[in-house]
Structures are given as C-alpha cells and as structure tokens.
Image (cartoon, grey):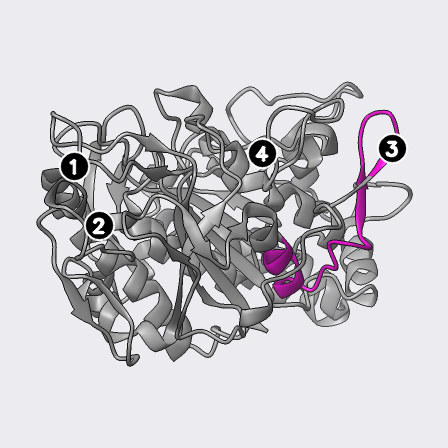
Amino acid sequence: MLTLFSKQPANRYCDGLSRRSFLRIGGLGLGGLSFPELLRAESAQGVGKSQKALILVYLPGGPPHQDMYDLKMNAPSEVRGPFKPIGTNVSGIQISEHLPRMAKMADKLTFIRSVVGAKDRHESFQCVTGRLSNNAPPGGWPEIGSVVSKLKGGAPTVPGYVNLSQQMKHTPYNQGRPSFLGVAHAPFMPLERGKEDMSLNGVTLERLGDRRGLLSAFDTFRRETDASGTMAGIDVFRQQAYGILTSSQLVDALDLSKESPKVRERYGKGTDKIQGDAAPRLNEQFLLARRLVEAGVRVVTLSYSFWDWHGQNFKNAQENLPDFDQAISALVQDLNERGMDKDVTVLAWGEFGRTPRVNDKGGRDHWPNVSCALLAGGGMQNGQVIGATDRLGGEATDRPVHFQEIFATLYNNLGINPHTSTVSDFSGRPHYLVDNEFQSIKELA
C-alpha cells in the first residue's frame, strides 16, 4: 500500500476517515473495492473514455451586446455609440472593431444576437444552470458541471467538474453549487476554495513552478519499486493507480510552466487586478481551461472581468474587449489546432444585456429583454449569426433563443439527452435537465 501523508490537519468525514486517506492505493475499500479495482470498474463502464467537454466563460455583470456582436449603425447616436463594425472572414457578418481576432476566425464561431429568458438579477445562477432561481426544487437547481459529474462521472485521474473562478465580492456572482446533487459533485476549485486540495506534503499551487523536490522524491519511489519488481508484476490498472499519485495529471494540467512561451503569449495575460466587485481579467484561465479538458475534465467554468458598466461604458469596453478578444480567440484556435474542436464546446455569456439608450453617465443599464452569447467548437455548424434584434437592439425580432435552448445544445454536445436524462432532488423526485418545450438549437446541428 502507498499512502501520501500531509502535515496539515485533515478534514474528516463522519466515519473518521480524512479526505487524504482517499489517496491510498490498494487497501482503501469502498464497497469492497480497492482503488485499482475502482479504476478497473470505471474502465469497464467506459468512464473517462469520452473526450466530450465544455468550457463555460461567465462574464459577470452582463456585457453590452450592442457594442460587441450586434452594432446598430442606423440607430440614433445615444443608442449607437462610437464603435464601428468590421467585416469578418464570413461574408455578411460584422462585429465590433474591438474584436479583430474574432473577426478573422468568425467561421469557427457562432454569434447569438437574440438570447431571451433572462431576469434582471446580478447572479451567475442562470448562466451555469439554465434555470431561474425561483421555483427551484428542494436544494436548488444544480450547475451543469455538477449534473455532468453525476451523469458521466470523471476520468479516473481528474475531477469531472473544475471551477477556475475566484471568490467574488458580489456573492451572487460566485459559482460552485452542486445543490441537491450533493458535495460529491461540487466543483474542484484550485484557484480559490480548493487550494487546500492541491497541497501534498507542503507542495501547494503557488509552488507549482518549482516542483523539483517533489519530482525527485517520486523518481526515488519509482526506482525503488521498479528495483523490487513490484511494478512489473501488477496489471495496468494498478500501474495507473500508482501513476495518479506519482505524476499527478491534475497538478500537471494546472502547471502553466509546461506550456511554451509562444502559446502563453498567444493567450496574453490580461490583469490580475479585481475588476469592480467581480473577477480579475485573467487570460491564462482560458489556457488552464484548455489544459484541464485535455487532461479529461468534462466541464470547466471560469469568470472573467466585470461588465456592469452603468458609467463609462465605452471606455470600459475599450479596456476589456481587446483582452477578451485575445483570450477567446486563442482558446478556439488552440482547440482547433489540437483537433479538439469537435469534442469541446465553448460558451461565453453574461446574465443579461444592456439598455439600448446610453445613460447620462455614459453607461448602459440592465436589459434582460435580450442579450448575446458566443459559441464555438462542439462539432457544431459554426460560422453564422443566429437571431436578430430591432433597430435599437432592444428586442429580439427574429429567432429568439432561450437560455434553455442553449443548455439543451450543451447537454447534447456532451452526449447527454436532456429530455430523457434526469437527476433526482432531495425528495427523490426526478427532474429533466431542461423543460420539454425547449430543444437544441437546430441551426447548429
């Protein structure tokens, strides 16, 4: 048996076992199964074989759709604003001049200009569940990452759901709620609440850049076990179990020093300064997300910057849009170059749109009537615009797309039928993943 001990006090479950006791190989019995046997059972059931994944980018505060993907050049100046549209590599599609990288790869993107069904609430809830927070069953609606963790599980070496968001001052922005699915399906949060989970004999997330001591110790362990003939005599599952502890796939995925400077430069840095009461504008979260899904994580969510611009809308947009443009374009390009674009869906959106009319502070206020979303990957028919708004950008006039239609699409892309699959709440009542009246977006099929 191999056990990795920590000097820190361990959190204990009700049966007295510490969470780090689950790192032991061979002797830990869960329902009579040792860890290698659990891996064998997972393999037999196909757990970890699917590469279908989702990267969900939440833009806290609600981005201005009229200044990004749906510019209204025929509207009055108090609606139109100063930004100009530019052409893209798809004939007939124009987007903001501050999104030039997206314009060059519009054939790989889908711009939804007519998202409806939002409520005037500053919270991430609807963006990560597809549901409204009212009329929820006991325990509340779970986030999509928790649902996928429940229905699909995770790969043997990584969690099914990772949330890269940091804690935000405005608490309704924060994610990480498994709700009635329970803590077993809560996201792993390596950049905030999950930092203690990344500790291994004093090696923390902050020390990932200098892992020579850890690797040296593991190399010694490998040499000793190989010399004794232990490794040669065990099956592939036992070797995999040793491998999980001796070369952590999750830790490696979170170690950006393993990426080439060229790739990191492509994504850019953004800024680690907290924006408003929300999140920093960290571009490298997008790169971490790609590395995590590449390692087998099924759902990665992240929160990016702060978009509640009641004042100085255009100044804020000029600061934020170029960084967002760089990060999302680098992610989509990266997924395509690695052949992951058919399996990994990317979604970026906020909780609602902004008012057509610019207020006396130069800002746009809350506008739940219509908003926007950006989709990529997932094997979808990208390179198109879906929906349209009126002359002022205030109402959907063509092909309104409901939040739940987008969630139906996400689940289908992940290999889950949202109309036949169910999850049960605390009372044991099963719930479909989206309401039956909402289907996947047919234009993307």
416 drawn magenta:
yes
Does residue 333 appear in this view? Answer: yes
- Identify the residue shown where x is 52% and y is 34%: 197
Crowding near the residue tagged with mark 3, few <14, some 14–19, many ≥20 C-alpha atoms within 10 Å = few
Which of 374/291 is in front?
A: 374
Crowding near the residue tagged with mark 2, few <14, some 14–19, many ≥20 C-alpha atoms within 10 Å = many
Residue 118 image point, x, y percent? 49, 37
The numbered disc on residue 171 is: none
How far apart in space, not on screen, are marks 2 and 4 (Cα)?
A: 53 Å
On the image, numbered disc 1 is attached to which residue? Answer: 313
Front position among marks 2 and 3 = 2
Front position among marks 1 and 3 = 1
Asked if the residue under mark 1 is in contact with the one under mark 4, i.e. CB atoms within 8 Å, the reply is no
- Identify the residue shown where x is 17% and y is 28%: 359
Instruction: Please tell me which of labels 2 and 1 falls first in the chain.
Output: 2
Residue 252 image point, x, y percent? 44, 56
Mark 3 residue element = loop
Residue 398 image point, x, y percent? 46, 59
Three-letter residue code for mark 3: Arg
How far apart in space, not on screen, are marks 2 and 1 (Cα)?
A: 9 Å
Instruction: Please tell me which of labels 2 and 4 falls first in the chain.
Output: 4
Asked if the residue under mark 4 is in contact with the one under mark 3, i.e. CB atoms within 8 Å, the reply is no
Along the horizontal axis of the image, is 340 left or right of 329?
right
On the image, numbered disc 2 is attached to which residue? Answer: 67
Asked if the residue under mark 1 is in contact with the one under mark 2, i.e. CB atoms within 8 Å, the reply is yes
For the record, the magenta segment spans 408-430
Q: Quadrant of residue 129?
A: top right
Three-letter residue code for mark 1: Asn
Front position among marks 2 and 4 = 2
Crowding near the residue tagged with mark 4, few <14, some 14–19, many ≥20 C-alpha atoms within 10 Å = few
Which of 246/216 is in front?
A: 246
